[in-house]
Amino acid sequence: MAHIQLPQGMPGIVGPLAFSPDTAKPLLELAEVLLRAPNTLTSAEREMIAAHVSYRNECDFCQLSHSAAAAAHLNGNFDLVEQIKVNPEGAAVSDKLKALLMIAGKVQQGGKQVTPADIARARERGATDKEIHDTVLIAAAFCMYNRYVDGLATWQPREREAYREMGEQMAHQGYTRDRFKETPKAAQA
Amino acid sequence: MAHIALMEGLPGIRGLMVFSPETAKPLCELVQVLLTGPHSLTPAEREMIATYVSSENDCYFCQHCHGSTAAQHLGGGEKDYEFIAEMKRGFESTALSPKMKALLNIAGKVQKGGKQVSTADVERARQEGATDKEIHDTVLIAAAFCMFNRYVDGLATWQPHDPDVYREIGRHTARLGYVGRDYKKPLESIASKQGSSAMRVAGS
C-alpha cells in the first residue's frame, strides 16, 4: 500500500502525478524535453539512459516503463534494452553511447563520482558538450523520479507485459499528453 | 574546471541554466512550486528540507544557497544562519517542531534511496500531524534535490566558498523566488571581487 492516499488503479508515478497536478506539470515537461525534444541523441538512446539509471536504482516502475519506451523506439527490440540495463559495455550500441552510459552510472552513485577521465572518454568517442550535459541531467532526473515513485511506495506491476502499451504511448505520444483521460493498460492488469 | 564549457562567473546551477534554457524552464518551475507560495509548511521549512538533503549529498553550492534562503526567510540574522548550520549537523536536537523532525527524517531516507522510507517513518510523521500533502511534498523536495545536487556536481560546476555569494543569493531568492529571474546577471558579490578571493577559489 502506498504511504499516502493516491487515486486507485494508477501505477507508479501516475498516482502521485494525479495527486499533485501543480508539480506534475514541470515534472512531465522536463521528461518531454529530456527524452523527446529534437536532439543529436535519439529518443531510443535517451530512454536507454533513463532505463539504465532506473534499473541501477532498482525502481521497477521506471525501469520497466522506460525500457518499454526505448523498445517502442527500437521496433520492439527488448533484448537490446535488457543488455543496456545489465551490461552496457557488452551491448550492440555505439562506443559513444557506452561512454555516456558510464557517466550516467556514475551520476547515479553521486555527482562527484564523474571524473575528468569519464568525460574525456566520452569526448574522444564524439560526444558533444550538450550530449554530456543531457546525459548528466537525464541520469540526475531519474534519481529524482525513482525516489519519488519508491519513496511513496506506489503500486508497481512487476510484469514486463503490463508496460508494453504504456511504452508505446510514452514513445509516440509523449509525456505531456492528457494522460488522466485514459485508463492505462497496467491499471486493468 | 567544469566538465563542459559554461559561461564564466556564474556559480553552480546558474551556468547550467544559461547553457540549457529548455531544461531550465521546467526545473525552475518545479522548484518554484515546491519551495515558494502558500503551503502549510512555511518557505523556511521547505528550504530547510532542500538544505538538509543537499548537505547529506555533500553539494556545497545547493546546501549554501538553500541554507541561506531558509535563513533569510527566518529573519536573515546571524542566529538564523547558525540555526541552519545546527540543523544540518543534527536536526533531532534542534528546536524544530516534532513534525518537521519527522519530515526531515523522511527526507534523509529518500536521499539514501526511495525504498528506505519505511511505514514507521511515515507513521511517525502522521502522528506528529503531517498531512498526505506534506508527506508527498517532503518526498518530492528530497527527490528533486537528489537531482539538482547530481546535476550541479556531476558537471563539476564552479562553486565558490565565499559566504557573501550565498548571502546575496539567499536574499534575492527569499524575496523573488525562482522563476522570471535573469540568471545571466553577474552577482554583485562576485563582480566586486573579480581578481580577488572569489576568483582564487575558482582557479583552485
Image: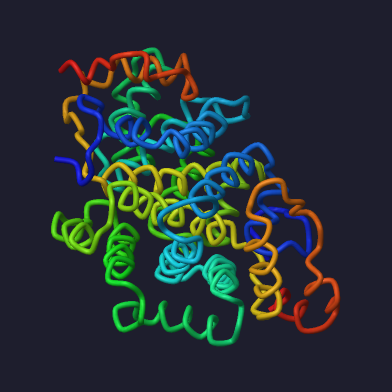
B155 displayed left or right of B11? left
Quarter holding the N terminus of chain A? top left
Q: Nearer the viewer, residue B30 or B4?
A: B30
Quarter holding the C terminus of chain A? top left
Residue B151 image point, x, y percent: 54, 54
A105 displayed left or right of A114? left
Residue at 18% across / 61% down in the picture?
B127
Q: Quadrant of residue A78?
A: top left
Residue at 34% across / 45% down in the picture?
A148
Q: Nearer the viewer, residue B15 or B167?
A: B167
B161 displayed left or right of B60? right
Residue A12 image point, x, y percent: 27, 33
Q: Quadrant of residue B64?
A: bottom right
Residue B186 image point, x, y percent: 81, 63
Q: Nearer the viewer, residue A156 or B30?
A: B30
Residue at 34% across / 52% down in the picture?
B134
Q: Is residue B97 above or below residue A118?
A: below
